[in-house]
Image (spheres, grey):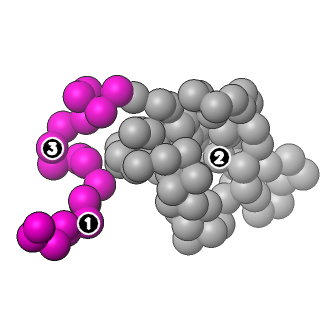
Amino acid sequence: MYQLTIDAAQAVTVTSHPDHAAAHRQLMRHVVRADYYLQPVATGPTHSAYDLLALAQGRRRPRRAGRATIDEVAADRVRPEDAPPQPERAPT
């Protein structure tokens, strides 16, 4: 299980995902919707951190708008309401 934390625009969002790729896809959807750019701070198989950058009108440099992290977490540390939906299994 992986946990995506997005701390930006005076709000913090935490979501759970079955794998790193799913968490990263969700992060990219957020980045595109909010018109941010990503600057990697640290990347690895169990932890990734990114600064969220926004272009400021009239400024030469982008401003840091927040931070996003993707962390591997033990499945038993994920609250049931935050767990990704599980596919239904056919009766055997």
Answer with mark 2 or mark 3, whichever residue precedes in sequence.
Answer: 2
Q: Which of 87 and 64 is in front in this view?
A: 87
Residue beneath label 3, please? 80
Gap in angstroms between the C-alphas marked 2 and 1:
32 Å
Indicate whether residue 68 is drawn in magenta. no
Q: Position of residue 44 (x, y in %)?
A: 69, 29
Q: Which amino acid does label 3 sit on?
A: Pro
Marks 3,1: beta carbons within 8 A: no
Q: What residue type is labelled 1?
A: Pro
Q: Give the residue displayed 72% in from the left and 49% down from the top.
A: 38
Above or below, 67 against 73 in this view is: below
Instruction: Judge whether residue 8 can be spotted in this image.
Output: no
- The residue range painted magenta reads 74-92
Which numbered circle lies on residue 52?
2
Indicate whether residue 84 is drawn in magenta. yes
Q: Residue furthest front?
A: 92
